[in-house]
Image (cartoon, rainbow, N blue to C red):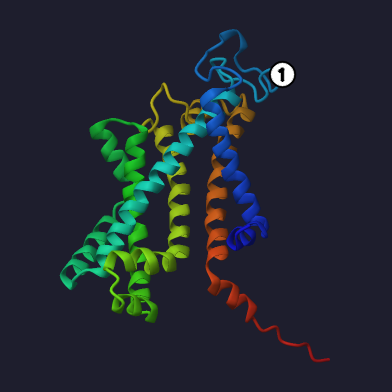
Amino acid sequence: MPRWLHSLLSSWTGRFAVLVVVGIALTAVVSVFWTPFDPMLSDVRGRWAAPSWPHLLGTDGTGRDILSLLMAGARTTAFVAVGAGLVATLVGISLAALGALTTRWVRESIAVLVDILIAFPVLMIAMMISAVWGGSLWVVVFAVGIGFGVSIARVTRPELRRVQQSDFVLAGRASGLTTGQNLARHLLPNVAPVFIVQLSWSMAVAVLAEAGLSYLGFGASLTEASWGTLLADLQRYIGVHPLTVVWPGLAITVTVLGLNLLGDALREATDPTLSRRSAQVHVPEVIA
């Protein structure tokens, strides 16, 4: 077992985060091939059924099985989280590299661009794009990915500038490594802990953004299962059937918490300086 993986699984936060992320991923994959019922199939005679067999989590106001809707919604959540993470990675690394490794006028231009873009809230950008192009999951993916890619670039850029002055980077440059080779071999691995935390946070916010936009009608379409859409449908009946609202809300909460904890646990597992600092903590002796 790799050392970082052993370190990740040695803490309860890491184990919980891995369990949540793996559980969501497996649920999303299984839902592609099988769900207990058709998530979009309505059964008026069976609406508002209490949790029992065969509807383990009950049904909604149109008779749809809530467990099947949650499983299909996990597929939507995984798609948005991974898609937004990939877009944020591409945008963040590109802007950070341009802002740290190029000529002065390019660096300053990138810094100004990042400061301008970061002033716009991600959800507002997504809502404006949705108003023009229509609501869809692709709008959420690109809006959240670009928005948090800018945030990743802002945090990663100074770290790249700091690592660029290290002796091993200067030695690599003297040995003939190009800027791209130095970036891949030395710079990115050394800023990975900071990048991982930002990336996991962006994926967690992507889940929240998709749920929020779908709740408002700007995200998933009516033919796509989404936890936000399900929450919007059920919250109108919270006074009569409060338990049905718990399931989508709990799914969103646990997923976001798991992604955030995974980023923190990965940072501790991959950053050797944290373990050295904890080892150097001095506990004063108690003098009787």
The residue lying furthest to the top in this view is 45
Counting from the top left corner in percent of width and height, residue 93 is at 33, 58
- Can residue 238 be seen from the camera position used here? yes
Q: Quadrant of residue 169?
A: bottom left
Q: Nearer the viewer, residue 241 or 125?
A: 125
Q: Quadrant of residue 168?
A: bottom left
Q: Residue at x 46, y 29 (%)?
A: 229
Assign the N terminus to one quadrant of the image: bottom right
Counting from the top left corner in percent of width and height, residue 128 is at 27, 40
In the image: residue 68, left or right of residue 285: left
- The amino acid type, in three-letter code, at marker 1 is Trp
Assign the C terminus to one quadrant of the image: bottom right
In the image: residue 169, left or right of residue 45: left
Q: Quadrant of residue 211?
A: top left
Q: How many badges with numbers are in the image?
A: 1
Which residue is identified by label 1? 53
Q: Work out whether 233 lies above or below 190.
A: above
Q: Residue at x 60, y 73 (%)?
A: 275
Counting from the top left corner in percent of width and height, residue 28 is at 53, 33
Q: Work out whether 250 lies above or below 204.
A: above
- Can residue 155 be seen from the camera position used here? no
Q: Work out whether 7 lies above or below 212.
A: below
The residue lying furthest to the right in this view is 288
Q: Work out whether 281 lies above or below 227.
A: below
